[in-house]
Image: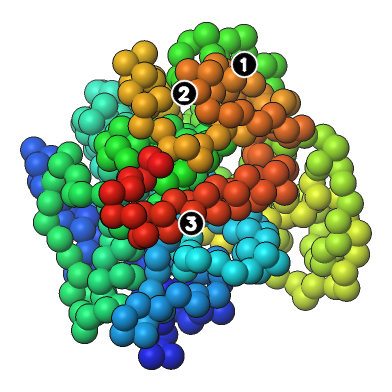
Amino acid sequence: MSAARSGRASSWGVEPEEGPVCRPIWVQIDNKHKSVRCEAGHEWAWRSAAERHHRGAYRLTCALQRLNNWEVVDESGNAVMTALVVLVPGLASSHGMWSDLLRSLREEMEKHGGRRQNWLACSVDNRGTGGSDAFPAKRNTPRGKATGRYCDSATHWSVHRLAEDAWLVADAVIEAEVHAASTSTTPNDIQHHRSPHIPRCAPLLPIILVGHSLGSAIVCRMLLQRPHWAAGVCLLSMNRGWLRDWLPPRWKMIWAALCFLWWRLRDAFSRGAADGDVAAERRYRRLVARAQLDLKLHFTGPYLDEYIEARQERIPPMSSSALQHRSSPAALTLIPRRTLLLRQYVTEASSSTPASPSTEWDGFAGQLQAIRSHTLTRAELEYLRTIMPVASWILFGADDAVTPHHGCRALARALHIPSVEVTAAHMVADEAQSSVVMLLHATMRHAEACASIAQTSPSATRST
């Protein structure tokens, strides 16, 4: 995953053939948001999340994975990272949503071979998802006042702040992979003090930005913050954020909003009413109901009803025993994909720590605040059109109930980039995986060609 030096493990301690490995990055920001301290060390690892938040610090995590066999070496004979793919997930999603896509992309790259760059994938966890902290935490207000609000939510929970987090993660990865591999510096010593509003000069290595839904909005904001940094942009299921792009709402979205509101009200009035097995059974049924609603909202029916090979676990359906027991898997059988995804959803949610549900809710509500406040103005769209890399495209599903296709087409027309419509719902990275892999692979090849031209011609720029 990271740069290997003299046959040893990478600067992040990851072997080349291992899968994605998560790494923490600690960020501290002052009250006036003028300076940021980002490091890959473990200074804040032994402090609680509440103490970190009190001191203006929070944790961001990312998953790193090599996309090809690193054959390009520097002057010292070290195989270092020479190209980076930054993937930003959508609402309430973590780096795990990119696992299958990156696996297929690595197979595609191995099939063609002959890479000119050493590609590294960096899957970012937004605030409040995965291993990243929900910063700022929910404010404790006295009884009788409005509760559940956030400290300066318009400032902390915005697409602008989430884009700054993604750039901080990318900076830390570049510092750890490139500079630490060529020097004797360890990742724990890598740190820099700077302002996110004043970006440094554009890096010499090609960077490709990939985003899904909310992640695509973060990618566009990243381009506005640091123009000409990206060699390629891949937007999945995104619109301009205008009201006309969301209307008319699909009936699936209306039903999902009503169910979500009902669950929140029921949890608020039934808190502490049941204990033990009754609470576990209720939590399990709530997880199953939410999983079924999410599957119907984000995937199409034929995709969920398709039979695939998987191991059928011997766990009775709709039972709270799945929260405490993990029985031995049976042989490979053909089961509907709906059953497999439902099992994965419930297993991941039930294996979380007791403090995770509140943190996940803080992150979900904060990201909803970022979506509500996100809108690309006409001036921003015009500027994005001028700085958009040549290798840029947007892909969306024809049956998407979350992001209607007419809004995605309007964004493509405003940015003057090609649009690709596939037969899928909102999760196009899973349902139309082959199309996404093909376009992403073509974008990486274009970035390699531009990097080769820039190396041979010093006057060449990234936009050529």
Q: Nearer the viewer, residue 441 or 86?
A: 441
Identify the amino acid type marked 1.
His
Q: Is residue 101 above or below residue 264?
A: below
Mark 3 = which residue?
A: 448
**Eye-nearest disc, 2 or 3:** 3
Q: CA separation, marks 2 and 3? A: 23 Å
Identify the amino acid type marked 2.
Leu
Residue at 37% from the left image edge and 85% from the top image edge = 77
Q: Are marks 1 and 2 in contact (CB under 8 Å)?
A: no
Q: Is residue 152 visible?
A: yes
Q: In the shown orientation, is residue 257 left or right of residue 72?
A: right
Q: Earlier in the sequence, mark 2 or mark 3?
A: 2
Q: Is residue 145 above or below residue 281?
A: above
Mark 2 = which residue?
A: 415
Local secondary structure at mark 3: helix
Residue at 86% from the left image edge and 62% from the top image edge = 309
Identify the amino acid type marked 3.
Glu
Q: Quadrant of the C terminus?
A: top left
**Residue 196: horizontal and vertical position, in percent?**
19, 44
Q: Nearer the viewer, residue 321 or 167?
A: 167
Local secondary structure at mark 1: helix
Q: Is residue 11 visible?
A: no
**Residue 23: horizontal and vertical position, in percent?**
38, 67
